Image (cartoon, rainbow, N blue to C red):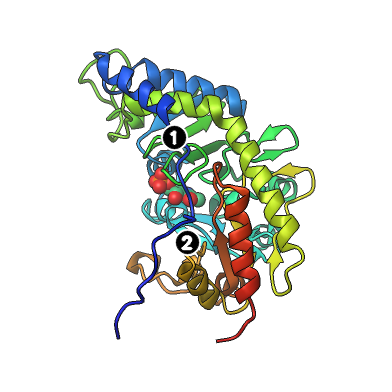
Amino acid sequence: MSATQYPPVTVPWARPPVGEDEADAAREAIAATRLSMGRSVREFEAALMDYTGRAHAIAVSNGTDALEVAMRLLGVGAGDEVLVSALSYIATVNCIVRTGARPVWCDVDPRTLNIDPAEVARRITPATRALVTADYCGFCIDYAPIERTLAEHGVPLLVDGAQSLGTFHGARSALALGRVSTTSFHSAKIITTGEGGMVFVDDDELAERARRYRGQGEVPARKYVHDTLGFNHRITDFQGAIGVVQARRLPDLCARRRAAADSYYRLLEQVEGVTLLDPLPGTTPAWFSLPILVDDRDRLAHELRMEGIETRSLYPIPTYRQAIPEYGHPPQPLPGAEETSARVLNLPLFAQITDDDIQRVVGGVRAHVGAGG
Ligand SMILES: Cc1ncc(COP(=O)(O)O)c(C=O)c1O
């Protein structure tokens, strides 16, 4: 059977919001003598400390490395259990498995695709070493009941904010929550440095340890003297320079995403067969993408792609069913994750998306949803 011939993509799923200002900043950084971990990286860290309200920000090579560092900071290791959503990006879970700890899957709330707080309360045990949350597509998790459960058991929270830089719980950044939080600057993210990530903490000692893990475990101010098993998680200065410009633009980029999401919701609310997710009251999503729940999702994705519209499914199978040998035997299926992974479709959403693009996407959804094969 030959592969489907699709027309060129005219509305991509994501588009990095970078232009001349970022190019100029990168060029200047390249002209400077220090190409890695210089002044621009420190400025980028300071800008995001300011934005998130965190006392420390440690820039690293990508969001996966940020999670790796976070696991080290929380002391997670073999024999531990770590609670995590059953519907997650793979890196959110891999960081747990890589330490030798066991992921304990918590089902999602089908109204938000976020981890269900009742599941956290149900599955926490004396062996639980941490909870890792990731605000799904920037939809803020209901943290109040989760924080109560964690406080009762003395378990720390790690917020994987790869999709939620720009998510606010009231006036508080979602990345200000948890003992440690992380984010990603991959090219599809809210802001980007191509690749890149950051670790956020308030505690001075944790910040010092994070910097040491990033830089091969070297003792500060003592070149080639090491007291910790570290790694090279460093980031270049031209990425830092791009990050400084992106951080400056972050509030505007988020406002554009919110305006696009408002337009989508106004138009999609009237489309039969489409279920929209409910943002938690009192919170502002970062709108990493525009998720909808539909029957016959794969056919709708195909029809949209035939019209040049690119979509994704975050995520098409529950994470516990990934065929990674280290994940061990799958547990009982979890109904929320099973149902929503079969129905979720993520529509294009990025800061530069136009009203025309949105009309086209919604027109395609309206024409093909529930239309049968
Ligand atoms: C929720 C989540 N966690 C972690 C990551 C990993 O980030 P990176 O691709 O920068 O390693 C991503 C990125 O795609 C993500 O969406």
| Residue 77 seen in this snapshot | yes
For the point 42% across and 59% down, the residue is 9
Residue at image mark 2: 310
Q: Which residue lies most toward the left here?
A: 224
Distance from Cα at disc 1 to Cα at disc 2: 20 Å
Apparent side of residue 202 relative to residue 219 in the rendered image (left or right): right
Compared to residue 192, the image places residue 152 above or below, namely below
Q: Residue 168: percent from the left, percent from the top?
A: 68, 38
Q: Which residue lies most toward the right here?
A: 281
Compared to residue 193, the image places residue 208 above or below, namely above
Relative depth, front residue between 79 and 243: 243
For the point 35% across and 65% down, the residue is 326
How packed is label 2: few (under 14 Cα within 10 Å), some, or many (20 or more)? many
For the N terminus, the quadrant is bottom left
Q: Residue 207: percent from the left, percent from the top?
A: 47, 26
Tell me, for residue 227, which label it has, or none.
none
Quarter of the view holding residue 156: top right
Tag 1: amino acid: Val
Apparent side of residue 325 relative to residue 321 in the rendered image (left or right): left
